[in-house]
Image (tube, rainbow, N blue to C red):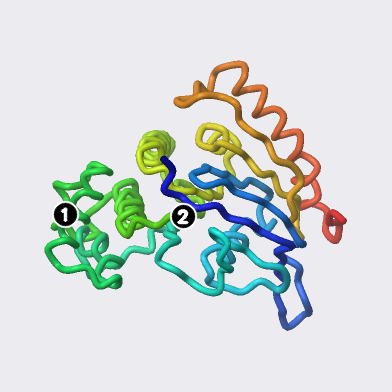
Amino acid sequence: MSTGKPIVLESLAKTYETESGAVQALLPMDLEIGAGEFLVVVGPSGCGKSTLLQLLAGFMAPTAGEARVDGARIQGPDIDRGMVFQHYALFPWLSVIGNVEFGLESKGIAKAERHTRAMDCLRMVGLEEFASKKIDELSGGMKQRVAIARAFATEPSVILMDEPFGALDALTRRFLQGELLKIWRQHQRTVVFITHSVAEALFLGDRVVIMTARPGRIKSEIRVDMPHPRDVTAEDFRAYERTIYELLDDELAKTFRPGVYPQ
């Protein structure tokens, strides 16, 4: 049974006001994300992928439209929406377990239960033996596993992930992709995952949303009808990959043509 919640975007848009004028980051978009779905968003650099995630996290307000989780409008940050960033965003002055316990303490959970739940989450990502270590004693891949454990520790219904594996080497990235899928299948949270990698999107996602060049809007959606674990060398996988690259080609070209953006 899914423990995630559905997300609905309705005419959601964002414009930034700058010294040189207004900059449209996201054109109005409509999207429904099912409870427990693993949705991946890809698109050219600067197309508004991270802006979209910031809006879903409640870190900023939309210029128009709204986003709702389980029918409730997003009006600010909420511990029910966990966030995993590319560059970990961990607290270096806390131990590994201290980082994982941080959100639990914010929820007012008693110390003994905090410890138990944090250790369960560290065990989930294979880091229980590193609970007392400082963050700067860990490798990049280990830090990201701590960030994932922290995100799941508060048992949020939605997990938002902004290129969480983008800074990692290929082998660590591949390993963590597999670990994330195991955790997701076990807990069935709703996941919105941002990436620049088409292969990563297809390896992980139930559905892949392709965005246009800035100002970003949804160009297409691809339902990935392949069981996990997925073979990246399979012809079906390669066919999906070709389709997505074809959809992205025009958008990528626009990023190299100053002043030319999709309408």
Instruction: Judge left or right: residue 238 versus residue 259.
Output: left
Q: How packed is label 1: few (under 14 Cα within 10 Å), some, or many (20 or more)?
A: some
Relative to 88, is 124 above or below?
above
Q: Residue furthest bottom?
A: 19
x then y, percent, for residue 19:
73, 83
Question: Is 137 rendered above or below residue 18?
Answer: above
Question: Measuring 70% from the left and 64% from the top, which residue is drawn there?
Answer: 12
Identify the residue position indicated by label 1 in the image: 131
User: Which quadrant is home to the C terminus?
Assistant: bottom right
Q: Are marks 1 and 2 in contact (CB under 8 Å)?
A: no
Left/right of residue 76 with respect to residue 63 in the rendered view:
left
Compute the Cα span from label 1 to label 2.
25 Å
What's the residue type where badge 2 is placed?
Answer: Val
Q: Position of residue 252 (x, y in %)?
A: 75, 46
Q: Given the image, on which type of amino acid does mark 1 rest? A: Ala
Q: Nearer the viewer, mark 1 or mark 2?
A: 2
Q: Residue at x 57, y 40 (%)?
A: 197
**CA neighbours of label 2 inside 10 A, class few (<14), some (14 to 19), many (20+):** many
Name the secondary structure under disc 1: loop
Please indicate, yes or no, whether residue 171 appears anywhere in the rendered image: no
Give the number of marks: 2
* Residue placed under numbered mark 2 in the picture: 158
Q: What residue sits 61% from the left and 47% below the top?
A: 41
Earlier residue among tags 1 and 2: 1
